[in-house]
Every structure is written in structure tokens, then in C-alpha cells.
Amino acid sequence: MISVSDITKTFRSGRGRVDALENVSLEVPAGGFTAVMGKSGSGKSTLLNCIGGLEVPDQGEIRCFDTPVNRLGTRQLSLFQRHMLGYVFQRGNLLSYLTVAENIGLPLTLNGVAGVKRAQRIQDLLAGIGLADAAKAMPHELSGGETQRVSVARAVAHRPRLLLADEPTANLDTASGRQVVAIMHRLGVEDNCTIIMATHDRDIIHAVDQVIYLKDGKTVREGV
Amino acid sequence: MNESGIGFWARIAFLFLVRSGRATAALSVMVVTAVAALIFLSALSVGVEDAMLRNTVGLFSGHVTVHHLPEEILPDDLQSKGVQAVLKRRYLPGVLSGGGLSQPLTLCGIDSDRESAITAFQKKIIEGRYPLAGRAEILVSRDLARSFGMRIGGRLRFADRLGKTALNLTVVGIYQTGLEFLDRGIVFCPLDRLSSGGIPWTAAVFLNAGISPDPILRHYRQQLPETARLESWEDQMPDLRQLIDLEAVSMVVVILLVFGVVAIGIACSFVIFIIRNMREYGVLKAMGVSTAEMVKLIVAKVILMNLLACGAGLLTGVLAVVVVARAGGIDISAFTSHNRYFAVSGVIYPRLTAFSLWAPPAVSLVFSMLAAVWPAVLVARRRAADILRMI
């Protein structure tokens, strides 16, 4: 289970103080697919970043499978992110100087998976996302939808327990977006992975188990 | 934590450099140019020192002079590794008379054929020729010839202080070097004129380029009798030693200034090179790449980049030195015609030394590593989300 208790996150910038999250609490069951919905600036990305340890909340506690993520030291946090977490960014963020196969293989290498096992896993994932022939392609040779599919494959390659996806369909057309969500769902289910996806796309509600609505940094509603 | 080794990160760094071809090439050009220029400057500095030494020592005196050598020791006995040639000479102090005037000076007996083959003195004979073996001939400076009112064919008489040797000699050559000790206090005759009377001989030892006189002096001290007196060119010409040191210091200052400018350029370029890809460090951090691994990646990039660029710079610099040296050097005669330290030739041949080869790449690497510290600290201290928000 993912448990978020009373977290607050404030940013200070040239525009003054911005309360990105205010006393947010929620629970996400293990193995489920949860969507965090809300308008732009509602705090979706900040919430995901806090859950994944990319950001530290100013107050409150986050526990992922009994690990207090916001209280981990640098080394323990890296270990948690390496083994337990997969992250799909809004813009894919594939490493531009690695091929598709090398991008997918990176978390495997980081987790000590090598040789035939690694090659087989990459091949399976490429087939799973419909890009079996793109192993040696560079990221700039892919379309937006293909980039996000590779990004999903990279995020789940090492079979993490938690997959965070920050608006993975935001820059895609409807068909490509649905394809990415379907792939994410399928690959997540295969490994019993808990998925939390930030989105403002209402069309994908049918694919998720739970929806959490955010408005101005506060939870306004939970439901299906 | 099961951290990935430097080999893995070196491979990632290599892929980054190769596949970011244009950025790598742009930065490489700067490092290559800087390293090549610094190598050439260092070689040129050595070349200037060589030229000054060659012009003074090579004119007559040699790098090492051994006085008071007994007859049983032969010039060949003084040959050793690094020695180009040994010239046999005899010095006899006395008085030179002619035209109603007399002047105390030293008569030097020389082997004209060997002298003209080894030294550059012949280039300083402005009239006539060297005195020939077996003949009672004398070579005098222009200043002395003027003092005595002598021309080619004139007659001079030399007598030593003890009256054991008296020679009547015909002037066959007049020279001008611009060096005080050669133009004022010495005249030359064939070696065989001074072979009798138990006058000890003096060896003028000429060394190959770049050979220090110190090991040769140590070798001679072990081999030669205690009566032999040894002098290096530094003992004979302390002013030249100081001038060469001064030139070296000046060149070091110039090189340091160039190093400074180049180093700042290299450092800034590396910072831009790393900052430009900051987002990718944020992605890696989100994937659980540790701080130590991130530092390994940055260091691997810097070192690999330097290895590639410095290798090319080294090659370019060496090539430039070789081409210039083989093409006849750099002729600065127009600026040295009245300089006694360039008495024979104003041509500079750049020469590579171990220092000129390792110092520029080392400086490039050190400054690049220093330049990488700030981005590395930035990556290490910031959260992944902060880095991803930066660009």
C-alpha cells in the first residue's frame, strides 16, 4: 500500500509563494491502477514527485510498501528508486545518446541484470510495446507515441513495485494515448505493479481502479 | 548498494561523446588547438635556448673545456656517449708584436680542418682563411689587425713570457665575432707550431643537442688525472646561463598566461557541456543512480573527452614542430643581427622535450576536472525534480 499522510509542499519563486500541496492525504492499494486528476497547476506532478522521492514534502509522511520515502537518506533513496520505482515522464525523457534497447536496458544494468537475461527482457519488452524492430533506433527517430511506449518499457524493465507516470499522454493524440495507457496497464498487471498516473485526460477513467481529484493542491474527491 | 563500476559508466560516457558528435567536436577543436599551441610554444622556447647556446658555445668554446691535459691522453679518450666531437687546442700566453706595437694576449694552436668541420668560427672569418698546418700563419681579429695596422700578408712576431717560444707568423685571415674574449685577447695559429716545449693541450668538447654537460663532467672527473681542470660553458659564460634562465622564465610567464586563458576557456566549455545535459542527469537520478555513480559518469566524460582531444592536440602540436623544424626553422635574423648571442645564425628550430609533451595535456585535464566539480556538486546536492525543473 502507498500511504500519503498530511503532506504539504510549498515553492518560493519570483512569483512569490506557491502552495503546491496542502495537507494532502490519500491511500493507494497495492497492485491497483490509480489516476490523479486535476487541472494544470493542481499539484499532480508534485504529488507524484513526492511519492517517488524526487521531491521532499515540507511536512507529512509518505510510506511506500512500509518504506518511509521522505525520511530516507540519499543512499537509501537511490536504492529505493532503483529497485522499487519506475517513472514515466511527460516528455518521455529517453537518454538521447542511447538506443531504444540501451535505454530499456539501463535500469536492468543498474539492478545487476546482465547477459542473456537482460537481452531477453529487452526483447520481450520491445515486442510487448510493438517496437521489436526499433531496438537500434535512436530516440530522435521515434514518434511521440513510440517514445512514450519506450519510456514505459524502460520504467517497468526491472519489474518495480511502483510505477509513477506523470501525464504520459499529455503530448499524444487520443489513439496513441490510449495505446500507451493500455501498455502501461498490461505491463503493470503482469508484474503486479502499483500504478499511479497523473493526467487530466477524462477519457482514460474507464481503465483505472481509482481516481483522486486534486484542486489547488488539495484533495477534493476520491472515487472510481 | 550494488553500484555499477567505472567500466559501465565509461561506456555510457563514450556513447554520449560519440553520439553527441557535433558538441563533442566543437569542444574538441578548442582543446586540440589549445594543446597544440601550447606544445608548439614550449618547443619554441626550448628552440630559442638551443639557438643561443649553439651560437655561442658552437662558435668556438664547446660545451666543456678540459685544460692541462698531458700528451698521453688523446682526443679519442674523451669520446663518450653524448659527445659530438673533441677538438685539440694549445694555449700559450705571450706578447704579439708588429708594426712597432706589442700587446699581451694568448696564442691558440688549432687544427684548422677539424675546427672548420665542427665549429661555426669559419663563418666569422671576414677576410682570408684559416692558418694551414705546417705553415707559420696566423689568424687575427679585425680589432687587432686594425691596432697593428696589419692586412693579409702582414708579419707579426709572437714570443711567450719565458722566452722559450718565438714565432714569426704571416697574417692569412681576419675574423670578427662580436664576442669580447675572441675579438680582443686571442689569435690563432696551426696546432703544430705549438707542439714543442711541453705545452699541455686543451680539449674543447662539443656535445649533441639537448645533452647536459653535467654527466660528461662527472665522467671526466673519474677518468682524467687530477691536474686536468674542467669547465662547463656555464662556468665560462655565466651571463649566457642567466640569459637562458631569463628567457625560460619569460617564456614560462607567457605560457602561463596562455594556459590561463585557455584553461578558463576549457573550463567554461566543459561547464556548458555538462549543464546542457543536466536534464539527463535528473532522469538518471530519478532512476536511482547514486551520487557516486553520477560523479563517475561526469569524470569519465571529462577524462575520455580529454584523452580524445589531447591525443589529437598532441599529434597536431608534434606535427607542427616537426614541420617547422624540417622546413628550416624560424628565421629571426632580422632581429638578432647585432646580438652576440645569435652571432652565427638567427634561425630557431623548435625542439620537443618531455615537459612540452606532457604539460599541456595535463593542464587541460586538470582544468577540465576542476570545471566538472561545480556541475558534479550541483547534480549531487539537488533533488531529481529540481534538476528536471532547471532546463
Image (spheres, coloured by chain):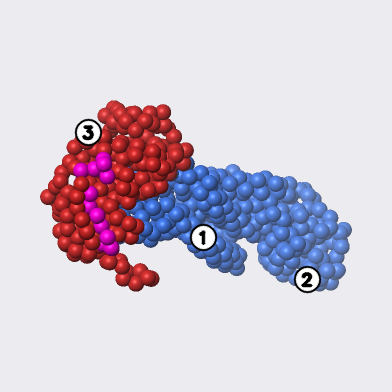
Segment tinted magenta in the rendering: A205-217
What kind of residue is marked 3? Answer: Glu
Check disc 1 and give the amino acid type: Gly
Residue at x-position 19% and y-position 63%: A23
| Residue A208 lies in the magenta stretch | yes
Circles 3 and 1 in contact, beta carbons < 8 Å:
no
Say the numbered circle drawn on residue A190: 3
- Colour assigned to chain B in the rendering is blue
**In 3D space, how far apart are the residues under numbered discs 2 and 3 (Cα atoms)?**
115 Å
Residue, x 24% and y 43% (percent of image)? Answer: A208
Crowding at label 1, few (<14), some or many (≥20) Cα neighbours within 10 Å?
Answer: some
Which amino acid type is marked by label 2? Ser
Q: Chain of mark 2?
A: B
Residue B170 got which mark?
none
Q: Which residue is mark 1?
A: B265
Residue B196, percent across and down? 68, 53
Which residue position holds label 2? B102
| Chain A image colour | red
Q: Looking at the image, is A179 positioned above or below residue A70?
A: above
Question: Can residue B99 be seen by looking at this rendering?
Answer: yes
- In primary-sequence order, the first of circles 1 and 2 is 2
Pick the front one: B198 or B282: B282
Q: CA distance from mark 1 to mark 2?
A: 68 Å
